[in-house]
Image (cartoon, grey):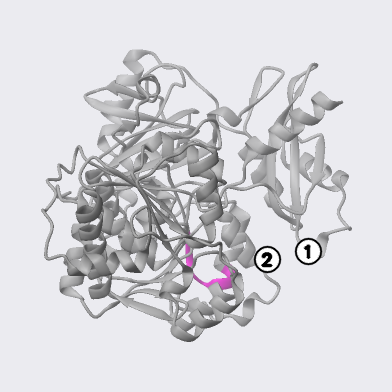
Amino acid sequence: MAKSEAPETYTPTPEESQKVFEEIISKKPWTKWYDKEVPVEIEIPEIPLYSFLDRTASEYPDKEALVFFGRKVTYREYRESADNLAKALHSKWGISKGDIVALYLPNTPQFAISYYGVLKTGATVTPVNPLYTGEELARQLKKSRARILIALDLLADRVREALEEKGASVDVVVYTGIDDYLPPVLGFLYRLKEKKPKIAYDGEKTIKFKQLLAIGSREVEMPKPDINPREDLAVLMFTGGTTGVPKGVMLTHYNLVANVLQVDAWWRPNIKARDTMVGILPWFHIYGQTAVLNLGVYRAARIIVFPRLDLDRLLKSISKYKANIFHGVPTLYSLIINKPDIKKYDLSSVEVCISGAAPLPKAVAEKFEEITGAKLREGYGLTETSPVTHVNPIYGRAKLGSIGIPIPNTLAAIADIEKPLLLPPGKVGELVVSGPQVMKGYYEMDEENKLVFFELYGRKWLRTGDIAYMDEEGYFYIVDRKKDTIKYKGITLFPREIEEVLYRHECVKEAAVVGIPDPNVGERPKAFIVLTDECKDRVTADDIIEYAKKHLAEFKVPKIVEFRDELPKTAVGKILRRILREEELKKMKQE
């Protein structure tokens, strides 16, 4: 096998850049590879995001919308609950357009109801990672200026810490419990087992979720919010925690409606009310919101809701409910293929799986498809793009290792890292995108907005921060994050390229490569490896290094390999190279 080599970098002239745009990018060469029924352009209506729920509940009122540990919520109940929540928030605290409501919840019916209920007031949702500490919660509440916090009762101690010790402030905290939407018997057993923090409810500053719904049910109506879909925010997402201080991403109703319709257009056949979707992706993350929560509502799908990962329950539920659409992340697919008894589960109902949020190793994709028979396609997106911009064709030509091709209504190109100039196919630069799903901007961060956007050839382009290239057929490949590249003797190394080789080793379950400062060469690559269970204690660091030497140029081979039981990850399973690098720097200082 030939040793791995990344494409070369290149700086074009303005004339070359314009030629690339006019002769290649503007003609969208990738559309040649669209599946037969996928349109090049779709019409995007200027409607509020919550219109999806209203329409689906009217057309399919008795269809199951959410399944939560066996508790089934129909689309009629879903809409009525969202309406009641909206009326209560408006009548008691005047929540309306311009206000922010924070959701500190895992995937539950309450999250889905709250999300659409808040939107129906005209206010904006800011989802908070339920794994956040009180300090992290306080930071987001302060940055967003949220007036209302809807939280899981098990997180009450962290809420109190945020509001009392860390100085955050909200008008009211609405608490809800997992047992609020469990079947009666399971709810009873849950309350016997789970020790909840004590909460003093006064009906004003602290109130129960179910009580709020009851208040809303007594209200006749509320004024319909005057939504400008292109300008008004539906969601304020906070991102950037993996590379620095989190930034507030402003996503409008139009952004999110557009991305749902773009993703919907990618599916074939486009038949509503037939899908059962796996709801394991966290909804506080934009990937889970668009690809599962909002797309599910638009398609009148049944969503199996998982508040946390329980691999056995996940696989049993796929079999029981005949789930056919599964959105996940590479680490989840890796867990599945490495499960010793995976063949005992019936996964034959699964038609399509999409992987996003992090690079999908080729070895993982190939083994997953071999085991399940389902189609696993890698896609790409980021919070700033609502999030989807690229996906491999589902039924047509998919290229393993590629993030695929731009979805309808989307332009993508490779730009010079420093200058607003476009590069030809095969040259490495920064991936830039333009389309209706691109964010309004960062919240109250004018300088950041100037850095991330540029105008060129009559379009507004977003710099993604990802190093990539496009091949001659219009397929895009991520080489690495701009901030994750390694400088070895002045040569740029890309961690993902090295990781792809490591993942091909039969004993490697997970891999991450980071640059370690070295005064002699600048930075030296170090590999962190999680071995499969059957390979522990029988594979050495030298074995991994020798394997890498067979497939990589000498200067790319990690000289240091460290084995770990697990690697640090975000809540959606993205491996955090930054944490590994920081740990190494800390050790070096101590030495």
In the foreground, 17 or 212: 212
Q: Is residue 137 visible?
A: no
* The stretch drawn in magenta includes residue 590: no
| Amino acid type, callout 2 | Asn
Residue interval drawn in magenta: 370-376
Which label sits on residue 363?
none
- The residue located at (76%, 19%) in the rendering is 521
- The residue located at (52%, 23%) in the rendering is 9
Which quadrant: the C terminus? top right
Q: Mark 1, residues whose alpha carbon is within 10 Å: few (<14), some, or many (≥20)?
A: some
Total label count?
Answer: 2
Q: Position of residue 193 (x, y in %)?
A: 61, 76
Q: Position of residue 145 (x, y in %)?
A: 36, 37
Q: Are marks 1 and 2 in contact (CB under 8 Å)?
A: yes
In the displayed orientation, state which residue is furthest to the bottom. Answer: 185
- The residue located at (23%, 46%) in the rendering is 253
Q: Earlier in the sequence, mark 1 or mark 2?
A: 2
In the foreground, 332 or 54: 54
The residue that label 2 is drawn on is 338
Q: Is residue 336 left or right of residue 155?
A: right
Q: Is residue 232 visible?
A: yes
Judged from the image, the secondary structure of the residue bearing numbered disc 2 is loop
Q: Is residue 497 left or right of residue 173?
A: right
Judged from the image, the secondary structure of the residue bearing numbered disc 1 is helix
- The residue located at (22%, 57%) in the rendering is 50
The residue that label 1 is drawn on is 533
Residue 227 picture quarter: top left
Residue 28 picture quarter: top left
Q: Position of residue 387 (x, y in %)?
A: 38, 46
